[in-house]
Image (cartoon, rainbow, N blue to C red):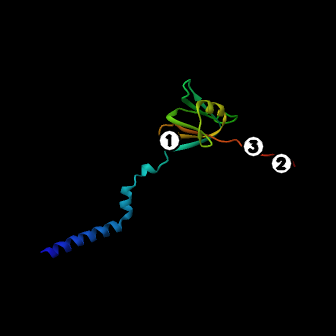
Amino acid sequence: MTVPKSIHQFAIRILALFILAASPGAFAERLIDKSEMRPTINVVESGGVSVVTNSAGEVVQVVTGVCEGCERRSFLPERNVRVMFEGQQLSAAGSDSMNGAPAFVGVRVNSGMATSVEFRKVVKERQNAN
């Protein structure tokens, strides 16, 4: 009686493996939450960005489009917004000195709040003397 029971268990395991092997796509669909595959942050590039701080040095507003002909947009900052220049975090005084410079602003999709500001180094093109 032991032999048929183990053969029966073996057959069930083999059958289960064949079912899983035949439908890997269906199995994977259940494992992957497609909502997690959507981007959560959009990046806005602007020729001029201003970071507005309060007297305590906290960022209270990020304004893009502070350049001639640019569309002006304003974002509230997330609590832990990062203001950076060339990979280094800026203090409130440092961010004030960068106001008006080109930057990339990270904006959270679901809230519309600024998550980061990355100021870019301005490189002037050399003019040809021809």
Callout in the foreground (1, 3): 3
At x 55%, y 41%, the residue is 106
Which label belongs to residue 128?
2
Q: Residues within 10 Å of mark 2 (few under 14, many from 20)?
A: few
Q: Secondary structure at mark 3?
A: loop
- How far apart are labels 1 and 3 at the CA level? 33 Å
**Viewer-nearest residue: 11 or 3:** 3
**Count of numbered labels shown in the rendering:** 3
Quarter of image, res 49: top right
Q: Earlier in the sequence, mark 2 or mark 1?
A: 1
Circle 3 packing at 10 Å, graded few (<14), some (14-19), many (20+), is few
Task: Assess disc 1: are there few (<14), some (14-19) or many (≥20) residues with their C-alpha within 10 Å of its C-alpha.
Answer: some
Q: Residue at x 43, y 49 (%)?
A: 36
Q: Nearer the viewer, residue 108 or 2?
A: 2
Tags 2 and 1 touching, CB below 8 Å: no
C-alpha distance separating marks 3 and 2 = 12 Å
Q: Position of residue 70 (x, y in %)?
A: 66, 36
Residue, disc 3: 124
Q: Of the residues shown, which amino acid type is indicated by label 2?
A: Asn
At which x and y percent is residue 35? Answer: 43, 49
| Mark closer to the chain start, 1 or 3 | 1
63 with respect to 126 (left or right) = left
Task: Examine the rendered structure and indicate whether residue 35 appears above or below residue 112.
Answer: below
Taking the image as shown, residue 18 lies to the left or right of residue 72, namely left
Q: Amino acid at mark 1?
A: Val
SS for dot 1 = loop
- Badge 2 element: loop
Residue sitting at x 67%, y 42%: 121
Which residue is under mark 1? 109
Q: In terms of image quadrants, where is residue 119?
A: top right
